[in-house]
Image (tube, grey):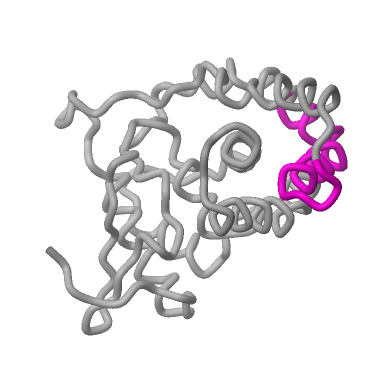
Amino acid sequence: YISGGHLKSLSSSDFKELGEVIADLHNISTKKYSRISVENLDLNFEHGILNILKEVKEKTYRKNSLKNKMKSLLLYEEENLIEGLKFLKENVSYIISKRKDRVITHTDLHKGNMMKIKNKIYIIDWDSICIALPEKDLMWFGDVKKVKKIFEKTYSKNLKKKYKFDKIAYKFYVIKRTLSSRTFFARNVLYEKNSREHMKDYVNWMENGMTTLKNALKD
């Protein structure tokens, strides 16, 4: 049990420390932990967004309902969603081919999964741990195009093997995460039984992240 506060923002010193922490994680030999599974790359969940798009076009919701708002957001972003899925399909074989570069990854490194106690950062919630390419973790420490330099410098310094940023892998994971989130939000508003407050959260998260996929798809 760890008692402390979740991080609400990351300072320069936090990025430096996290560069060391993530490098230490990626330095661990995957052979030592054979029970950790390799990431799932079948894209079935992400592909579900196409079925959702097809279904919402055929349905009519109450004008001011949250379901209708979600429908509007999905249709507004339809082109980017389809392009994102196309990119994943075109590049998944490349990601699979990079087996020798796989490391142990946390995969869910948002600030809610970080706690700071006496100026030391602890990473929590390891439920999604898997073996994947390092960019699956690195994408949490930058924008949709690249890793922050202050993090990258410390990370590469503490990494045992030579560090080389993989632009395609980084873009793949950013788009995959974004499509997965879109599919999850849409399903929870359109099909699942949730409270109105939770549904409002899903709609707001969907709306607030509208530019993420569009920017990630830009060359």
In the rendered image, the vertical position of residue 150 relative to residue 72, given as above or below: below
Q: Position of residue 34 (x, y in %)?
A: 18, 24
Between 172 and 101, the one nearer to me in the picture: 172
The residue shown at (37%, 65%) is 18
What span is colored magenta in the figure? 62-85
Residue 130 is covered by the magenta coloring? no
Between 67 and 218, the one nearer to me in the picture: 67
Q: Is residue 65 visible?
A: yes
The residue shown at (24%, 29%) is 36
In the rendered image, the vertical position of residue 186 relative to residue 113, given as above or below: above
In the rendered image, the vertical position of residue 76 relative to residue 117, given as above or below: above
Q: Position of residue 11 (x, y in %)?
A: 47, 80
The residue shown at (34%, 31%) is 131
The C terminus lies in which quarter of the figure? Answer: top right
The residue shown at (35%, 41%) is 105
Secondary structure that dominates the magenta span: helix
Between 42 and 15, the one nearer to me in the picture: 42
Residue 65 is covered by the magenta coloring? yes
Q: Is residue 219 visible?
A: no
Question: In which quadrant of the rendered view does residue 156 lie?
Answer: bottom left
Question: In which quadrant of the rendered view does residue 56 lie?
Answer: top right
